[in-house]
Amino acid sequence: MSQQPDPLKVIIAGGGTGGHVFPAIAIANAIRDKVFNAQILFVGARGKMEMQKVPAAGYHILGLNIAGLQRRFTWKNLLVPFKLFDSIIRSRNIVKRYKPHVVIGVGGYASGPLVRAAAKLGVPTLIQEQNSFPGITNKLLAKKVDKICVAYEGMERFFPKHKIFLTGNPVRHDILLANEKKDEALRYFSFTSKKKVLLVVGGSLGALSINQAMSLNIEKLLNAGLQVIWQTGQGYYELANAKALLLKDSALSVHAFIDRMDLAYASSDMIVSRAGAIAISEICALQRPAILVPSPYVAEDHQTKNAMALVNMHAAVLLAETEVREELAVVVINLISNDDNLHKLKQNITRLFYRDSANNIAGVALSLVK
């Protein structure tokens, strides 16, 4: 552990979903492990989950009044240019006032204006691209930043090759230790070790298609002898919980949001999930057989591209959004009852996990400090 005469100052910008927030916190923790008394400031978007999750992790955060365009027509879209202009001015003021030694962008609304402001002011900058197909913001920032950390091979198609570092995506420390907690996890969910456990998640915000598929198929899954952990997101929780109360089955555990995600992973034998970059990284880290249901509503359809990176390696099974309602139970039961196929998926997915990602990203960032 090294110590600097003047405290190292770092800004980490971005958020919006758990897929951006949790890796950002992991990078911050890795920097603090490397540099004694490092001062780390987060910048996020007001009203987004980072405004709660970052302080809960022990870090200070400032919020920008920024939002993206809605896909449907709404008057709120008229405010987007004004919010962007305000965020650009505020980002410049934050950088000038805080005087960071390095700025890291992790994606999300706040990442663009803050990293852009830092680069214009001559502050060393780094972005972390979590997906196999980058979004517009990171494509634009790539021309201005000093280094780019990526999670997939072949990213020179999108970014200058000399700036790229293949680091993988950071995985939370508690998730990395999940495989050691099987007994604790089963007790936590009041499950038995005699039945297999299916974990169903739609990302931190939930996924309507997966929730609807679960409502249609939950009885088939339970009748097949499975124990099921179902994370719904806040918007679908009441309907799912009402279903669970009707079924009165101790093999079903329904949650709006799972605070102990490490234990949910630890208890699971197989996972049904969206194909967000961080969800995939966590599944790879724990070598879990997975059925991936990519969201078609994200920019550039990047979740499908993320999923195909695994499917092409025979490391996961893809179930399309249009198929999940009708096919979920059949695909889950056929796969989870075939131990040979489960073992092959575990073997293949292990090869796709990059160890020490947060530590490596922190190292790249610190190499930019003058």
Image (cartoon, rainbow, N blue to C red):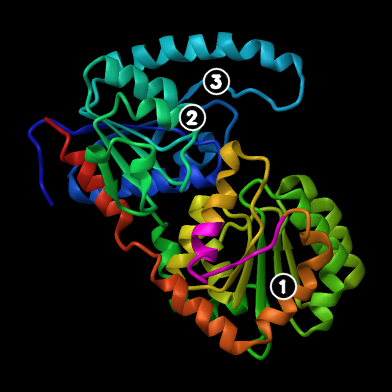
The image position of residue 49, as x and y in percent, is 56, 38
Mark with earlier residue (3, 2): 3
Say which residue label 1 marks.
228
Q: Quadrant of the C terminus?
A: top left
Residue at x 80% of width, y 63% of height: 214
Does any portion of residue 77 appear in the rendered image?
yes
Distance from the alpha carbon under mark 2 to that under mark 1: 37 Å
- The quadrant in which residue 10 appears is top left
Q: Amino acid at mark 1?
A: Val
Say which residue label 3 marks.
66
Distance from the alpha carbon under mark 3 to that under mark 2: 16 Å
**Residue range highlighted in magenta:** 308-320
Q: Which mark is residue 136?
A: 2
Q: Determine the secondary structure under disc 1.
A: strand
Residue at x 47% of width, y 46% of height: 131
Residue 273 in the image: above or below residue 81: below
CB contact under 8 Å: marks 1 and 3: no
Q: Is residue 315 magenta?
A: yes
The image position of residue 291, as x and y in percent, is 63, 67
Q: Determine the secondary structure under disc 2.
A: helix
Mark with earlier residue (2, 1): 2
Distance from the alpha carbon under mark 1 to that under mark 3: 38 Å
